[in-house]
């Protein structure tokens, strides 16, 4: 099965996106599990004198959305990898590449939205934790007692999810660039017309400079 270097590069990018998507969804799910399935993003926390008290959570669908985007993108990349293992490098038409570019751009938009949700949601949560004035950093909340919950790595998991999401955005940008290059490579070569000056040059070279009869 012969494949080109650009095609191998594309497969490597798909594989990296697959791994990042799985890490993001898994880390976020584990963080939710430490709080009984609640979504910590944009949450609010207070201090009751001896422990941290979760005052509010975001709707669970917000975390589900972020996880779903990561899982769907990961599954798409896995499908591409699986298909590539069973066939040679495909010769796709320009129209097919254009459609793929549009789909990839839409996916990039969803990945960017998910990454922004994770970033902003963590910032709001950490700002609420720091507002209690009992901690020097947001990560220290992992070592503090919580009312009704016993989280031990919620911040680390949220940070891993956020980092994976942004790496995914970067990798998908590279994948878009790779698709653009593939589209340029598959661009049809324009044919010379009778009126083009190149036509006369090529004709004279073939005919040995003899003038054409009208």
Image (spheres, helix red, strand yellow):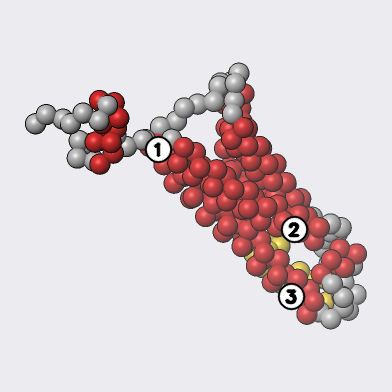
Dot placed on the residue nearer the N-terminal end, 1 or 3:
3
Q: Give the left or right position of residue 138, taking residue 181 as reference.
A: right
According to the image, label 3 marks what residue? 127
For label 2, the SS is helix
Residue 16 appears in the picture as rendered: yes
Q: Which mark is residue 187?
A: 1
CA distance separating discs 1 and 3 = 51 Å
The structure residue drawn at horizontal position 57% and vertical position 37%, both measured from the top left corner, is 76
Dot placed on the residue nearer the N-terminal end, 2 or 1:
2
Q: Residue 162 at x, y = what percent?
A: 70, 57
The structure residue drawn at horizontal position 40% and vertical position 32%, both measured from the top left corner, is 93
Q: Quadrant location of residue 11? A: top right
Q: Give the left or right position of residue 182, taking residue 65 as reference.
A: left
According to the image, label 2 marks what residue? 158
Rendered view: 26 above or below 123: above
Tell me if label 2 and label 1 are in contact, CB under 8 Å.
Answer: no
Quadrant location of the N terminus in the rendered image: top right
Label 3 crowd bin: few (<14), some (14–19), many (20+), radius 10 Å: some
CA distance separating discs 2 and 1 = 43 Å
CA distance separating discs 3 and 2 = 15 Å
Dot placed on the residue nearer the N-terminal end, 3 or 2:
3
Tell me if label 3 and label 2 are in contact, CB under 8 Å.
Answer: no
Quadrant location of the C terminus in the rendered image: top left
Rendered view: 132 above or below 88: below
Residue 154 appears in the picture as rendered: no
Closer to the camera in the image, 42 or 19: 19
């Amino acid at each position: 099965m012969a494949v080109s270097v650009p095609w191998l590069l594309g497969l490597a990018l798909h594989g990296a996106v697959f791994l990042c998507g799985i890490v993001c969804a898994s880390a976020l799910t584990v963080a939710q599990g430490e709080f009984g399935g609640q979504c910590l993003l944009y949450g609010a926390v207070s201090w009751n004198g001896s422990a941290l008290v979760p005052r509010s959570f975001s709707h669970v669908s917000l975390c589900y959305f972020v996880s779903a985007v990561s899982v769907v993108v990961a599954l798409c990349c896995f499908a591409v990898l699986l298909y590539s293992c069973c066939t040679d490098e495909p010769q796709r038409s320009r129209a097919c590449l254009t459609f793929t570019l549009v789909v990839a751009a839409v996916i990039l938009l969803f990945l960017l939205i998910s990454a922004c949700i994770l970033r902003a949601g963590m910032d709001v949560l950490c700002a609420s934790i720091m507002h209690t004035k009992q901690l020097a950093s947001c990560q220290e909340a992992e070592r503090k007692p919580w009312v009704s919950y016993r989280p031990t790595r919620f911040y680390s998991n949220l940070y891993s999810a956020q980092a994976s999401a942004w790496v995914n955005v970067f990798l998908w940008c590279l994948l878009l660039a790779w698709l653009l290059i593939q589209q340029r490579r598959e661009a049809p070569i324009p044919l010379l017309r009778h009126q083009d000056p190149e036509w006369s040059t090529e004709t004279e070279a073939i005919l040995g400079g003899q003038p054409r009869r009208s």
